[in-house]
Image (cartoon, coloured by chain):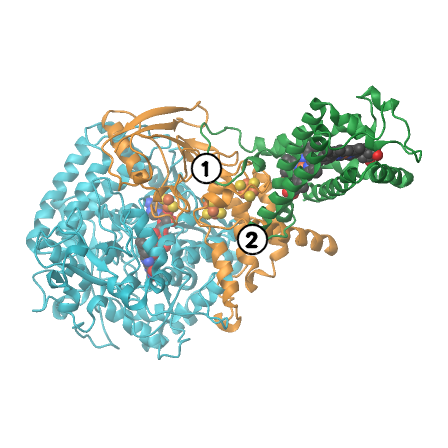
Chain colours: A cyan, B orange, C green
Amino acid sequence: MIGSLDSRIPAGPLADKWTNHKDHARLVAPNNRRKFEIIVVGSGLAGGAAAATLGELGYNVKCFCYQDSPRRAHSIAAQGGINAAKNYQNDGDSVFRLFYDTIKGGDFRAREANVYRLAEVSNLIIDQCVEQGVPFAREYGGLLANRSFGGAQVSRTFYARGQTGQQLLLGAYQALCRQIAAGTVEMFPQTEMLDLVLVEGHAKGIITRNLVTGKIEAHSGDAVVLATGGYGNVFYLSTNARGCNVTATYRAYKKGALFANPCYTQIHPTCIPVTGQNQSKLTLMSESLRNDGRVWVPKKPGDKRAPAQIPEADRDYYLERKYPSFGNLAPRDISSRSAKEVCDEGRGVGESGRGVYLDFADAIARLGETTIRERYGNLFHIYEKITGENAYERPMRIYPAVHYTMGGLWVDYNLMSNVPGLHVIGEANFSDHGANRLGASALMQGLADGYFVLPYTLPAYLAGQIGKRPPTDHPEFSKAQSEVEARTKKLLSINGKRSVDSFHKELGLLLWDKCGMARNAAGLREALGRIPELREEFWSDVRVPGEDEEFNQSLERAGRVADFLEFAELMCTDALTRDESCGGHFREEHQTPDGEALRDDENFTDVFAWEYQGNGSAAAPKLHREPLIFETVQLTQRSYK
Amino acid sequence: MKFKLKVWRQKDPKTKGKLVQYEASDVSPNTSFLEMLDAVNERLILKGEEPIAFDSDCREGICGTCSLTINGEAHGPDHPGAACEVYMRRFKDDATIVVEPFRAKPFPLIKDLVVDRSALDRIVQAGGFVAARAGSAPEANSTLIPKQNADRAMEAAACIGCGACAAACPNASAMLFTAAKVSHLAFLPQGQPERTRRVLKMVSAMDAEGFGNCTNTYECEAVCPADISASLIAKLNREYAVASLRRNADE
Amino acid sequence: MIVAVTGVVLIAFVVGHLLGNLQIFLGPDWVNSYAEHLRELGPLLWIIRAFLLVNVLVHIFFTISLAIENRRARPVRYKKRDHVKATFASRSMALSGLILLAFILYHLAHFTVRVTDPRFLLLKADPLNRYDVYSMMVYGFQNPFVSGFYIVGMFLLALHLSHGTSSFFQSLGLNDEKLAPRLVTAGRLFAWLIFVGYTSIPVAVLLHLVKPAQQL
Ligand SMILES: Cc1cc2nc3c(=O)[nH]c(=O)nc-3n(C[C@H](O)[C@H](O)[C@H](O)COP(=O)(O)OP(=O)(O)OC[C@H]3O[C@@H](n4cnc5c(N)ncnc54)[C@H](O)[C@@H]3O)c2cc1C
Ligand code: HEM
Ligand code: HEM
Ligand code: SF4
Ligand code: F3S
Ligand code: FES
């Protein structure tokens, strides 16, 4: 069905590609724009920015989100900051350097052209956000402040206290509100997309469920934009919001869109550990804590003494020991994996044995409690709220948690998937972060896609589409709609003995174990054996109370978990097929003698894009490979020794 | 730990609701309030009963989705913080805990503890923005903003849009929410051109939604999870007075 | 806004009136001449009275209609309600205000129209041929019930003002983060000073510290 993957990367030198592309891109005349209806699913940084911008340009936009307000999209939770190549600090930053760092950080598994464009438009984003009233941190002289983030050698991160995502999202939300008031954008909050509708092979609409009334509805458009975020919640516990899901992208996948690199997931090293059975989500503690905290565990397994009782000689500062030059600041994946290792050895701390200490005693002795309070007061406060422990007196306990997913729907340079008309932006696509994302780059990508890329590339598709929007009574719509209705009815009718959450938890644990921080072929095969069984059990034994035509949170979750149960298999298949280690994907079979990820550039310098062939192992998904061609950068091995 | 819960149950806006009693047993003090409700729900589902509907998303106090009135306090006893940041160790063992939705006329009830807060969105739509088209912005450092102004704008902009202010206000007034947005943009140079229009339109949208009037009882400030100061309400009053005079002068 | 402006005027009156009344401690001559001066203002007095009346009416009209609106803004009440910061005074402004209104009506009937106490008509003019306001007050307050009611009235006034005084700064936008806590304290202090000031008069009369200037 799908021929070779055409990434549509423009010709010419790397630095000129985007400019040339824009110069020659097709346009839609202003008077024609209002003839188009664009469906934007998602109101996060990517979706909110895109919907607002397309509205400003004069298109008719319908924007959907599952929360009760577009302002609550999960982008709101990002803390650290957003990168841009402004070089305001005069410390040698440039578009090229940001591009290079992003490619290298992604372990050379992303497209050069996309990443270069991202670095190029990063500066426009800061201008745009400041103009919208985003209150970025400033210096006394009134200039914008920057900090260095995630081990970068330049200070290029812009931030608004610990709430950068919130402030950027509110900027986009306000722009969106303006368009809603102007009538160019129609907002559908509490409306979940449950299927994509293709008419003659083109994406021309979606099927939604109104989460308040339970009504299943069809919406048609000239193009569909998915901006539905990441799928980290497939692990049940993650730093993502409860509602984050794979449903929209997975249903698109089932309609023929390719899913790229689903196994690339990012684990964040500093989260508050799981405390009990009922834990429903994990909370991130900013990585900046590692600047002053020292990570350690007891030397002896099973040492249950209180941390203060453990003498210096019985402590293992394992990051400092293994990575003398980077120490506690070793990159995310490395410190995450090291924490897992020591816990696997039985040396973990806390009730569950899944945690390591992050100790500020030395820093407090050196700098004084006041300084530490100034730097991290709010984080210590959050920590105390959640755990009830005072981190000034006893070390914090931290553990890695799932945080971000680099994989997503495959898109070309125009951010269009292989399905004509279906565009995918933000965390939902696979395009810019390769196998590992640098800190403060997701916000940048979401806004780049929404404000400055999609508005230029969407016309390339639209220009040939005037008057081709089908009515919602087209048979394809009624077909899709009745499928969705049947599925909903089915979920409600099983009436078994297990709750939706119990399945989700079980799936999450399984994946965390077999397809989490470290993976191996045997474990992945085991998971691939277990997932279909679990799915089977789900469809025969789940209990979803309530009815379809009402506000029914159990039903919402059931639909999402059902999709996770299928998607998990795709993820493990991808992880098994990618027989190398790279970035966030660590295959235990492939590591250097000191436990570093070992890439296999000869065989795997490409994107894995999976095509749906039917449920389960009976019809395994079909793999398409898009080779990654590096014209500008040289592939190197990371080293943090 | 164990608790007696009295939870507001109401099938839909038309049905009459009431407080229904539930037991929560075997609760670890390190469980969050919402996770305690999750556990109660799991048991209800297995017993074949309808679980309690309540809203949440981020569960870390930033998205503003959660909206519970716990023992008569919006967001519960742990201020400043959202309901999702309340942990069971805050309660005495064996305590009786009353859980109700956020109540205000502009927040119509959807089910049990879930209310519709789109009124807050409409207040922002009335003018809570800067008209800055994508692509039209000047270079970011071309306008200097003194640090203290940026900081004050940030403090105001921290509002998470939860609506607790209106839920807690004895008069169900949304002044703190509106004040936060008006102040955020009024503190910044980018917000100046639309300053007069913005405050007039946002206040009239707020009134049109049916929120009550502020009589300066400061309950809002006490429950606000984002620590928004009620002094911004004074600022809003000031902005509004000046804007009204300006408008009259213009006409 | 209107409530605040009218409130300020009322506060100003209350202060002025207190100063006038406290002259009772300086003896009959002071009070009576003060009252006489007031009367000598003639038409001006009526203008002031009319202004005050309008002010009170406007204040009442707006506060009551706001209070009604505010009740409507929460059609379904909480079963359980707890307040973190809102004081009793701030939550019961309408109630304290209404009782205050009842007090003012009684007070006007008592001292201005003088219909409640037949003895007041028997009062002779003072030596300078002025109406003996001084003795009127003393006789009025010798009745413990009358005094009691006054004290209750003053208490509600203080309650109303303990919130109202700082509140009007906020309503007029004359407040900021640094000022806020100070204003709240100052407002309460002011209100209770007013209370002490006013109640000192009936209390002094009851304790026979102030005696009538003439016998009936
Ligand atoms: C705790 C945390 C901290 C982070 N910190 C940083 C940071 O410091 N810097 C950084 O660069 N990145 C950070 N990230 C990553 C970054 O926040 C996200 O990758 C990014 O915000 C994603 O934006 P988005 O617009 O793609 O998706 P989201 O913001 O997740 O938005 C998804 C939207 O899609 C809607 N949606 C989803 N599914 C459906 C459906 N089926 N039907 C209808 N609507 C749907 C949702 O309602 C929502 O509106 C952080 C992430 C987390 C979790
Ligand atoms: C007679 C009946 C009265 C009623 C029903 C009444 C009611 C109220 C109410 C409900 C408020 C709160 C409104 C708000 O803050 O926006 C208020 C405020 C106030 N009242 Fe009264 N009141 C009365 C009389 C008085 C009197 C006699 C005085 C003065 C002596 C007074 C002084 C004030 C002041 C100063 C405020 C604060 C204004 C503000 O915050 O804006 N009131 N009143
Ligand atoms: C102990 C307390 C008080 C005493 C002794 C007192 C005394 C008096 C006296 C003697 C008069 C008549 C003056 C005259 O006719 O010349 C008067 C009038 C009046 N008092 Fe009071 N008063 C007291 C408290 C109050 C309070 C608390 C209020 C209102 C909040 C108030 C409002 C008025 C008004 C409106 C008048 C009519 C003024 C006029 O005639 O123009 N009084 N008072
Ligand atoms: S002002 Fe505070 S209480 Fe009100 S909506 Fe904003 S965050 Fe919530
Ligand atoms: S609680 Fe209500 S009365 Fe005003 S100060 Fe806050 S809005
Ligand atoms: S769930 Fe997001 S603030 Fe509580």
The answer to which image quadrant residue C57 occupies is: top right
**Front label number (2 vs 1):** 2
Nearer to me, A418 or B27: B27
Amino acid carrying label 1: it is Asp
A272 lies left or right of B14: left
**Mark 1, residues whose alpha carbon is within 10 Å: few (<14), some, or many (≥20)?**
some
In x, y percent, where is residue A605?
17, 68
The answer to which image quadrant residue B44 occupies is: top left
Q: CA distance from mark 2 to mark 1?
A: 23 Å
Q: Is residue B117 above or below residue A606?
A: above
**Residue B182: which numbered mark, if any?**
2
Q: Determine which residue is flagged by label 1.
A: B116
The total of numbered circles placed on residues is: 2
Nearer to me, B196 or A473: B196
C55 lies left or right of C124: left
**Residue C99: which numbered mark, if any?**
none
Say whether residue C158 is visible.
yes
Q: Could you say whether the residue bearing mark 2 is in a helix, strand or loop?
A: helix
In x, y percent, where is residue B37?
30, 34
Q: Could you say whether the residue bearing mark 1 is in a helix, strand or loop?
A: loop
Nearer to me, C214 or A600: C214
In x, y percent, where is residue A579?
11, 61
The outermost residue toward the top is C118
The answer to which image quadrant residue A379 occupies is: bottom left
Asked if the beta carbon under badge 1 is closer than 8 A to the nearest atom of ligand 4, the reply is: no
Amino acid carrying label 2: it is Val
B154 lies left or right of C132: left
